[in-house]
Amino acid sequence: MVPYLRIKVNSDKSAAIQFKYNKRSSRQIVDLEIPHFKFLNEKIPWQLNYKYLGFTLDENLHFRDYIERVRETAIFYRGRLGAMLGRKSKLSRRNKHTIHKMSIRTVMKYVSPVFAHAVSKVLDRL
């Protein structure tokens, strides 16, 4: 190891991802001509998707996996809170709105700038 670098690489927490800008999808993780990725003599594995700071990066930056996970989480919370937020609930409209803002909206708004760059077909499901 080089003495002036004080970085220790944890290959279990690291991943290499290749971003592709072509329309056709490939089943290969990496193009065949790209060699194994090494950083400070540690092999870094190639992956198609990688979860980073709560959202998932994919090879084409379409954010399909992240948007699907946000959708499932919002549906989960809506199902759990359905009795409190439903029409027959005795809660006031203001309290229902507050509960919605605290639980469901926070899930939907986390990393929401990603939605601006997502594919419209994927956003329709959200």
Image: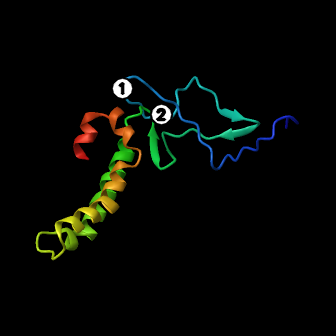
Quarter of the rendering containing residue 121:
top left
Relative placement, left or right, of 17 versus 120 is right
Residue projecting furthest to the right: 3
Q: Residue at x 24, y 68 (%)?
A: 95
Residue projecting furthest to the bottom: 90
Residue 50: give x, y in percent of width and height.
Answer: 50, 44
Q: Residue at x 67, y 46 (%)?
A: 11
Residue 58: give x, y in percent of width and height.
Answer: 44, 38
**Residue that badge 2 annotates:** 28
Relative placement, left or right, of 83 versus 41 is left
Q: Residue at x 45, y 44 (%)?
A: 56
Query: For the N terminus, which image quadrant?
Result: top right
**Residue that badge 1 annotates:** 24
Q: Residue at x 53, y 40 (%)?
A: 47
Note whether residue 63 is visible: no
Q: Which mark is residue 60?
A: none
Mark 2 residue element: loop
Q: Check the image and report above or below for 93 versus 7.
A: below
**Residue type indicated by callout 1:** Arg
Note whether residue 35 is visible: yes
Neighbour class for label 1 at 10 Å: few (<14), some, many (≥20)? few
Residue 19: give x, y in percent of width and height.
Answer: 48, 29
Q: Check the image and report above or below for 92 versus 10.
A: below
Residue 35: give x, y in percent of width and height.
Answer: 63, 27
Residue in the foreground of this view, choosing between 43 and 83? 83
Quarter of the rendering containing residue 82:
bottom left
**Residue type indicated by callout 2:** Gln
Residue in the foreground of this view, choosing between 117 and 100? 100
- From mark 2 to mark 1, how far is it between C-alphas? 12 Å
Neighbour class for label 2 at 10 Å: few (<14), some, many (≥20)? few
**Which numbered mark, 2 or 1, is in the foreground of this view?**
1
Mark 1 residue element: loop
